[in-house]
Image (cartoon, rainbow, N blue to C red):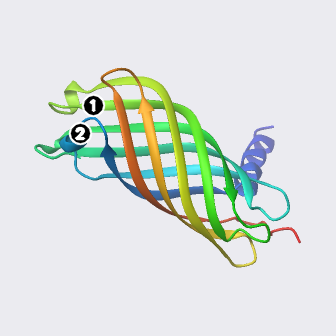
């Protein structure tokens, strides 16, 4: 029975592509002058809709960005982690190459540690984002290279809100799966 469960989990993992990528972001709006450029990682599942793959439902499993303070560096920081669902539409009817738009909505946790990591406060709330970018289809498997600008606002209470603009580069790859057609 245990082997069947392991096989099921592995087949699910290899049949749906998972991507983990890097990003840089800048806080905008309230408190923008307090923080330097932030760095982050994100990972998502991609579920193509249709034969071409130019539309897809995306589950962003993790979007984590940390912003160091301008005055105290990494001793004082703010950041967020969010889990979102979205829909990506590539403005091309023939392939996955082209400009895209991807609205997203989900859950977030905003963390602020102004006097050090031991005094961190956090709040949970709603995350909303929109990403605009360009994707290039590479190879026969439907792999893609993505360049995107993303605006995200994470609202976890009056004093725990972060809005940011980020630049993201990601590479979509599909293991053991060919594109149809």
Q: Which residue is mark 1?
A: 112
Determine the image quadrant of residue 86.
top right
Q: Position of residue 7 (x, y in %)?
A: 77, 49
In space, the residues marked 1 and 2 are separated at their CA atoms by: 6 Å
Task: Name the residue at the top extreme.
Answer: 158
Viewer-proximal residue among 147 and 3 = 147
For marks 1 and 2 on the same chain, the one whose residue lies earlier in the sequence = 2
Where 103 sits versus 176, above or below?
A: above
Total of numbered circles in the picture?
2
Where 150 sits versus 53, above or below?
A: above
Q: Is residue 20 left or right of residue 10?
A: left
Q: What residue lies at 24% left-to-right and 36% top-to-bottom?
A: 31
Q: Is residue 172 left or right of residue 81?
A: right
Secondary structure beneath dot 2 equals: strand
* Disc 1 + disc 2, Cβ < 8 Å: yes
Determine the image quadrant of residue 106.
top right
Q: Which mark is residue 77?
A: 2
Q: Is residue 42 left or right of residue 174?
A: left
Task: Name the residue at the bottom extreme.
Answer: 139
Secondary structure beneath dot 1 equals: strand
Mark 2, residues whose alpha carbon is within 10 Å: few (<14), some, or many (≥20)?
Answer: many
Report the quarter where the N terminus lies. top right
Report the quarter where the C terminus lies. bottom right
Q: Position of residue 3 (x, y in %)?
A: 77, 44
Q: What residue lies at 52% left-to-right and 42% top-to-bottom?
A: 129
Q: Position of residue 161 (x, y in %)?
A: 36, 30
């Amino acid at each position: 029975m245990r082997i069947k469960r392991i096989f099921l989990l592995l087949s699910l993992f290899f049949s749906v592509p998972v991507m983990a990528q890097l990003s840089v972001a800048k806080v905008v709006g309230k408190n923008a002058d307090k923080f330097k450029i932030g760095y982050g990682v994100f990972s998502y599942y991609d579920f193509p809709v249709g034969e071409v793959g130019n539309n897809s439902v995306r589950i962003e499993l993790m979007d984590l960005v940390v912003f160091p303070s301008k005055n105290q560096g990494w001793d004082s920081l703010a950041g967020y982690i969010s889990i979102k669902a979205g829909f990506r539409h590539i403005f091309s009817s023939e392939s996955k190459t082209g400009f895209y738009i991807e609205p997203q909505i989900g859950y977030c946790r905003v963390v602020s540690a102004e006097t050090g990591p031991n005094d961190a406060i956090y709040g949970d709330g709603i995350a909303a984002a929109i990403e605009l970018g360009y994707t290039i289809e590479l190879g026969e498997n439907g792999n893609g290279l993505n360049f995107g600008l993303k605006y995200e606002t994470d609202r976890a209470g009056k004093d725990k809100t972060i809005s940011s603009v980020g630049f993201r580069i990601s590479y979509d790859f599909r293991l053991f799966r060919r594109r149809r057609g």
